[in-house]
Amino acid sequence: MDRFMQGYKAAWEQRDPAMFAALFTPDGRYHNTPFQVQNGTAELMEYWKRVQLQEDVKVSYEVLSDTGAGGLAHWHVTYQVASEELFQIWAKSTGTNLVSRKPGDPLPRMVLDGILQASLANGRCTEARLWWHSMPQAT
């Protein structure tokens, strides 16, 4: 599990969709929320492109459980929103109005915190499920 999380951290900090997809089997599944899933390499890479709209990404994690065939990890991420497009994706997905922002105001630095459950086979992920929350970093 630690090896998978090291790769997850590197793929996010380097904002690299191919590196992210390589963590999974060709038919791997990534449930980025309980209600959304990306299936297979092409969908994984397409989904991960959104991290290219982030800057100064910092990822930390703690493996909570490791069975050899998978496990659980607590992860924490901070990043600078680098585009209005990413801010709008975030604002629409939260269903809340946590950031009072006028056009032209600086984009926020975000904090994400969550749990990742992974099933692994031969060192690659067959299925990952995430539960997470995000909010603007306090200034």
Image: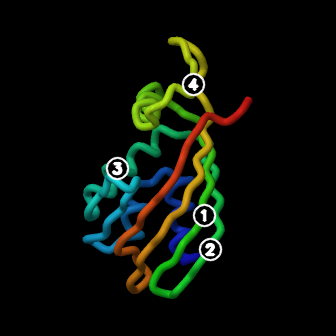
Residue closest to the eye, 19 or 44:
44
Name the residue beneath numbered marker 4. 99
Amino acid type of the residue that numbered disc 4 sits on in the rendered structure: Val
Rounded to the nearest angstrom, the CA distance separating label 4 from label 2 is: 32 Å
Name the residue beneath numbered marker 2. 64
Discs 4/3, front: 4
Instruction: First in sequence, mark 3 or 1: give its number.
Output: 3
Name the residue beneath numbered marker 3. 47
Rounded to the nearest angstrom, the CA distance separating label 4 from label 3 is: 24 Å
Residue 63 position, x and y percent, is 62, 73
Classed neighbour count for the residue bearing mark 3: other residues with Cα under 10 Å, few (<14), some (14–19), many (≥20): some
Q: Does 88 sit left or right of 79 as displayed? A: left
Rounded to the nearest angstrom, the CA distance separating label 1 from label 2 is: 7 Å
Name the residue beneath numbered marker 1. 74
Q: Is residue 34 above or below residue 87?
A: below
Q: Quadrant of residue 93?
A: top left
